[in-house]
Amino acid sequence: MKITRPGVFPVTLKLIKDMKTKTTISDFRFEPAGYGRYKVTYTSPVTWKQWTAITNDMELIDATKCADEPKRQDLETLKRVCKRG
């Protein structure tokens, strides 16, 4: 089955399912949203869908945004926070 979207090359459905991409820091966008709060936007590298959440969990923000090499567990936790809203 071929999937086509405007501006995107046709790809097979199997190819999309086989694309197992890892979450990286570049998938997130951080914006200050007041004192001690950040607006975090996660963009899926496969579907380009976006989820946004406002969080005041500064330990998680420091572990991801301010870290040189963020841990995979912290990135997955932040992704869950964004998808939960």
Image: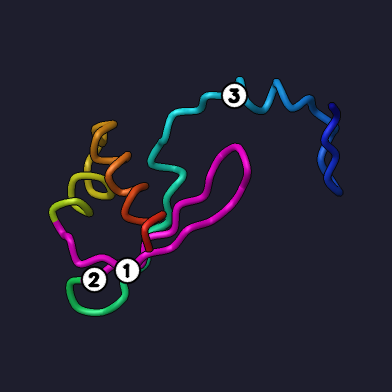
Q: Residue at x 31, y 75 (%)?
A: 33
Tell me the quadrant of the picture where the C terminus can be found. Answer: bottom left
Residue situated furthest bottom in the rendering: 34
Q: CA distance from mark 1 to mark 2?
A: 7 Å
- Front position among marks 1 and 2: 1
Depth check: 22 or 81 in front?
A: 81
* 19 sits to left or right of 71: right
Q: Earlier in the sequence, mark 3 or mark 1?
A: 3
Q: Which residue is mark 2?
A: 37
Q: Residue 39 location in percent, x, y?
A: 35, 67
Residue placed under numbered mark 1 in the picture: 54
Q: Residue at x 61, y 20 (%)?
A: 18
**The one of 16 and 24 positioned closer to us in this rendering:** 16
Q: Measure the C-alpha gap from mark 3 to mark 2.
A: 33 Å
Q: Position of residue 67 (x, y in %)?
A: 22, 41
Magenta segment, which residues? 37-58
Magenta span contains residue 51? yes
SS for tag 3?
loop
Q: Dot 3, crowdedness within 10 Å: few (<14), some or many (≥20)? A: few
